[in-house]
Amino acid sequence: MHILVIGGAGYIGSHVVKALLQRKMKVTVFDNLSTGTKLNLFKEADFIEGDILNYNQILDALKQNVDGIVLLAGKKAVGESMENPMKYALNNINGVINVLNAMVEAGVKKAIFSSSASVYGTPLYTPLDEKHPENPMSFYGFTKLETERFLKWYDQLKGVKFVSLRYFNAVGYDEDGDIKGLEENPQNLLPIVMEAVIGKREKLKIFGNDYDTPDGTCIRDYIHVTDLATAHALALEYLDKGGESQILNLGTSLGSSVLEMVHKTEEVVGKKVPFEFAPRRAGDPAIVTAKPDKAFEVLGWKATHSDLKNIIASTWNMYKNL
Ligand code: UDP
């Protein structure tokens, strides 16, 4: 299969490219390099610099005998989406519509879409299965849910088959060190912990220690990006065998608290994590964990890289020499 990985120079995209290459797929990366970097490109994959907001660019790329796409390009900062919904509407909705329309025009019928646990909003129960009501609390989550609805219609009306993968908390880095690009201005917990360890920031602020959890800090389902990447490869193989469209959670079912992440980091890297407790962050639920059984049933997928030690060690590898 020849796969166009849209957003393949980014953090998750580059790991996906590696997983597809390992499974002997031909890969072309399409990326506008706005947050992605050439450091994340593989010499075995072709590269097109282009933007999903430019219809002709994406159409031309899809016309290069592409069998399927992985669509990762988009904006992903929850906080920013609440301040600048226009940017998210443009990139995460208009951009996706462009890609879908170009797929129809080019006759490409297989799409893997990067979605998010944020489509569920505040959990009514955990672990979350795919039947949990969808009630996004952020504009970002709303754009992901809307896109899934577009995908369902394009399947019904135009036969575009899709697998939408709802990521829980993506963490870690390639364990072979093949991916070199570090995300700039990280907004997520583990990179912030690392920056506190190396002194790039003074302290980690832990948002709330009065939650109804064993240690009072929030619990999340941290999933290694290499495990996420494998799911994309399996999903493409599933669609190639004629599988029906699916929406699948990708997580471990296990949860770790913020304090557990801090203490495990101290153990793995052998250094203190300077931190202080700060007020709760608006919109943070106490516990978010995934029930990943459907991904196992449909794809045979299960997390195998996601123990905390692996996650932290592979992240530390990227930060220790900064
Ligand atoms: N968190 C924190 N301090 C930070 C960043 C995150 O305490 O500087 C906490 C946050 O409240 C949440 C967890 O770490 O409970 C994971 O947050 P992140 O932003 O990485 O992902 P989210 O679960 O919000 O998608």
Image: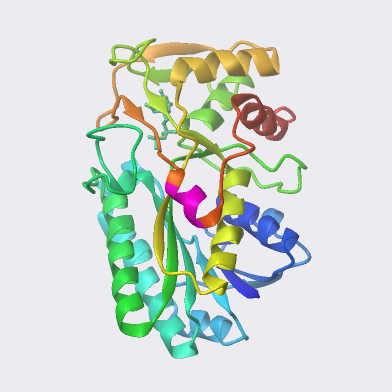
Asked which colour scheme the image uses, the reply is rainbow
Q: In this picture, is 93 found above or below 255?
A: below
Image quadrant in which you'd find residue 4? bottom right
* Residue 3 visible, this orientation: yes
Quarter of the image where one finds residue 315: top right
Residue 300: % across, % down: 56, 51
Residue 69 lies in the magenta stretch: no
Q: Could you tell me which residue is drawn at 51 percent across and 81 percent down? A: 57
Is 295 contained in the magenta span? yes
Percent across and percent down for residue 301 are: 56, 49
Q: Is residue 139 left or right of residue 16?
A: left
Answer with left or right where residue 236 lies relative to residue 141.
right
- Main SS category, magenta section: helix
Quadrant of the drawing holding the C terminus:
top right
Quadrant of the image containing the N terminus: bottom right
* Quadrant of the picture in which ligand 1 is shown: top left
When the figure is inspected, residue 139 is found, relative to residue 50, above or below; the finding is: above
Please give the range of residues in magenta.
Answer: 294-298
Q: Position of residue 104 (x, y in %)?
A: 42, 85
Residue at 39% in and 33% down: 289
Name the residue located 67 percent from the left edge and 31 percent from the top edge.
319
Q: Is residue 202 visible?
A: no
